[in-house]
Image (tube, rainbow, N blue to C red):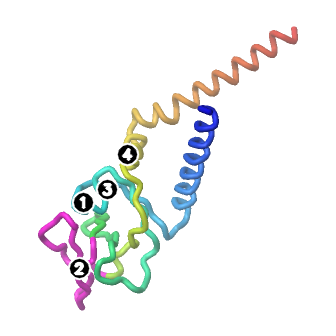
Amino acid sequence: MMKIFIWIVSIILGLVVMALCLLHLMPSYHMYIVLSDSMKPAFAAGDLIVTAPASSVIKDGSIVAFQQDGHIITHRVVAITADGVITRGDNNDVSDAPALTSQIRGIYLLKIPHVGYASAFIHTRTGCFLVVILPAVLLLGWIIKDIVREALRST
C-alpha cells in the first residue's frame, strides 16, 4: 500500500514539475518569487507566483505584475486613470506610483505556496551543489560502479 502511495505522489510531483517547466519555456508566462508580505493574504513572501500574458482588459481588482524602478512588483489594481494603472498591495495603506500599461508584465494566474524559498535556495552556491552537482556526482558514481562490476564479472 505504501509503494502505491509513493508512486502516486511521485507521479503528481513529476507532472507539477513538468507543467512548471513548460510554463517557464512559454514566452508570455512568467514565474516570480514573492519577496514581501505586501499582498498578504492573497500570497506571501516565499510563494512562487505565475503570471499570464497581460490582456488588453485590465480592470479594478486584477492583480498585475509590473516593472517599476528596475523591480517587478505584483499588486492589485485599485484604479485606472489617464496617468496609468494605480496599484496597491492588499497589506499596504499607500498606493503605488501609476504604472503605464507598457510596464505591465502580466496578470496573476496562480500561486504555489512556499516554493519560492526552494527556488531561491537552488540559485545559491550551496543549493546548486546540493540539488544539482551532488546528485549528478552520485549518479555518475553509481553508473561507474555498475560498469566496473560488469567488467569484473565477465573476466
- Measure the alpha-carbon separation of dots 3 and 2: 20 Å
- The amino acid marked with disc number 1 is Lys
Q: Position of residue 103 (x, y in %)?
A: 33, 76
Q: Position of residue 69 (x, y in %)?
A: 24, 67
- Measure the alpha-carbon separation of dots 1 and 4: 20 Å
In the rendered image, which quarter is residue 21 located in?
bottom right
Q: Find residue 120 and name its label.
A: 4
- The amino acid marked with disc number 4 is Ala
* Mark 1–mark 2 CB contact (< 8 Å): no
Q: Residue at x 42, y 41 (%)?
A: 122
How packed is label 3: few (under 14 Cα within 10 Å), some, or many (20 or more)? many
According to the picture, the residue beneath numbered tag 1 turns out to be: 40
According to the picture, the residue beneath numbered tag 3 turns out to be: 34
Placement of the N terminus among the 4 image quadrants: top right
How packed is label 1: few (under 14 Cα within 10 Å), some, or many (20 or more)? few
* Labels 1, 2: front one: 1
